[in-house]
Image (cartoon, rainbow, N blue to C red):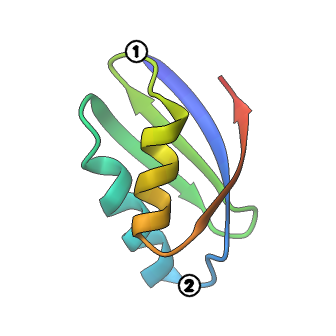
Amino acid sequence: MSDTTYTVTGMTCAHCVASVTEEISEIGGVTAVAVDLPTGAVTVTSDAPLADAAVRAAVEEAGYQLAATVTA
């Protein structure tokens, strides 16, 4: 298992959290997504490390921006 935390900007409400969670959950190997709305921290648990490009694409598909990878 691998946990990586990203910073996502532009989320302001529960709908934002749901959209980001749904898109990231569709990436192969993702087993859990936890979003902290006040900080924009999104922790992704996966079977193996994920490509940042895949996470960035999912976040952008949801309509938000991936600002940074906090931990790998």
**Which quadrant of the structure image shows residue 22?**
bottom left
Q: Residue at x 49, y 64 (%)?
A: 60
Inspect the image, locate mark 2, and give the three-letter code of the amino acid beneath it: Cys
Q: Is residue 71 above or below residue 24?
A: above
From the viewer's perspective, is 27 left or right of 62?
left
Q: Is residue 24 above or below residue 59?
A: above
Q: Is residue 6 above or below residue 58?
A: above
**Helix, strand or loop under label 2:** loop
Q: Residue at x 54, y 35 (%)?
A: 52
Q: Quadrant of the C terminus?
A: top right
From the viewer's perspective, is 54 left or right of 13?
left
Q: Quadrant of the N terminus?
A: top left
**Which quadrant of the structure image shows residue 58?**
bottom left
Label 1 environment density (alpha carbons within 10 Å; few <14, some 14–19, many ≥20): few
Q: Pinpoint residue 4: horizontal percent, then vertical percent.
A: 58, 30
Whether residues under marks 2 and 1 lie with C-beta atoms below 8 angstroms apart, the answer is no
Inspect the image, locate mark 1, and give the three-letter code of the amino acid beneath it: Met
Residue corresponding to mark 1: 1
**Helix, strand or loop under label 1:** loop
Q: Is residue 8 above or below residue 52?
A: below
State the separation of the CA atoms marked 2 and 1.
Answer: 29 Å
Which of the two labelled residues, at mark 2 and mark 1, occupies the earlier sequence position?
Answer: 1
Q: Pinpoint residue 19: horizontal percent, then vertical percent.
A: 38, 72
Residue corresponding to mark 2: 13
